[in-house]
Amino acid sequence: MTLLDTRGIPRALFASGAGLRARLEGWDAGIRGPVGSVRRIGFLQLEPGVGATTLARETLRIVAERRTDPPLTVDVTADGALAAHLGADVTPPSDRRAYARTSADATAGLSRGPDGAFVLRPSGTQTDATGAWLDEAAPISRFFDIAITDFGPRHPTVDMAAAAALCDVVCLVSSAERGAAELSRSLAGAVTGLPERPRVVLALSDLSGTARRAPEAVAAHSLDPVVRIPRDPGLAAGAAARSLRARIALLELTAALVAGGTA
């Protein structure tokens, strides 16, 4: 079953198959549509282990499947898990990329992931992730429609603002448990209040499979899109989502990040 195939979907999930189809098609069209010069999407997580790398990977996959031009993927996390998953090692610095004037210059020396995306894994990310992004990604991001960066865990009072300022859209990833979800909502206001004014999308990962009320409460009081990511055995194993709920949530999240809405 594809994400746009509504056959067999229980009506308990949605009021009608027609309503679901309209939402799926709207999200799909938003992901495929024009985004302007470039859409720089950054994934930041408030604590380790809540799934920012997984969501960055799945967003990349959905974007690469639906857009003609391959996106840029940047991994400035300490462990480089996203780049490793895509089969990429540390990217050697390049004067050609640093002074890029053409797309060929911008992609020189970059790895290609299995979905065709270009992958940049700068050196020096363990000590200065934002500096590595500015040195290596900033000179080339303008040559891509979509640039997706995994920033990994960032502390609200130390380096979250510096990372968020590099993005057009920030995906704040946290646990869906009440305390973490409410903290992410409060931090969203600080992020949108930065001089660069990035948009924020909250991704609440239901790691226990039992956190349902907190995401609903946060969404009811949030000015920013909120997407609950249900627990899924495929995602937990580092593979594609297996459940329909998770696949729909990932499409909704990607549409919110790329197109600016979840309706």
Image: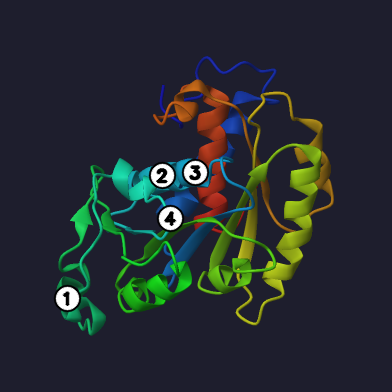
Q: Earlier in the sequence, mark 4 or mark 1?
A: 4
Instruction: Name which residue lies at 63% across and 55% down.
Output: 201
Look at label 1 and name its amino acid.
Asp
In whole angstroms, how far apart are the C-alphas of marks 3 and 4?
Answer: 17 Å
Query: Which element carries disc 3, helix, strand or loop?
Result: helix
The 10 Å Cα crowd at callout 1, few under 14, some 14 to 19, many 20 or more, is: some
x and y percent of residue 112 in the render? 20, 52
Look at label 4 and name its amino acid.
Ala
Q: Which mark, residue 55?
A: 3
* Contact flag, marks 3 and 2 (Cβ < 8 Å): yes
Query: Which element carries disc 4, helix, strand or loop?
Result: loop
* Contact flag, marks 1 and 3 (Cβ < 8 Å): no
Q: Which mark, residue 124?
A: none
Q: Nearer the viewer, residue 168 or 190?
A: 190
Q: Earlier in the sequence, mark 3 or mark 4?
A: 3
Which residue has dot 2 on it? 57
Q: Nearer the viewer, residue 131 or 26?
A: 131
Give the number of the mark in front: 4 or 2: 4
In whole angstroms, how far apart are the C-alphas of marks 1 and 2?
Answer: 25 Å
184 sits to left or right of 89: right
- Can you say which quadrant of the picture contains the N terminus? top left
Look at label 3 and name its amino acid.
Leu
In whole angstroms, how far apart are the C-alphas of marks 3 and 2?
Answer: 5 Å
Instruction: Name which residue lies at 80% across and 46% down.
Output: 218
Instruction: Name which residue lies at 83% across and 47% down.
Output: 220
Which residue has dot 4 on it? 78
- Tell me the quarter of the picture where residue 5 sits: top left
257 sits to left or right of 137: right
Query: Would you place residue 131 above or below residue 149 in this image?
Result: below
Which residue has dot 1 on it? 105
Residue at the far front: name it. 127
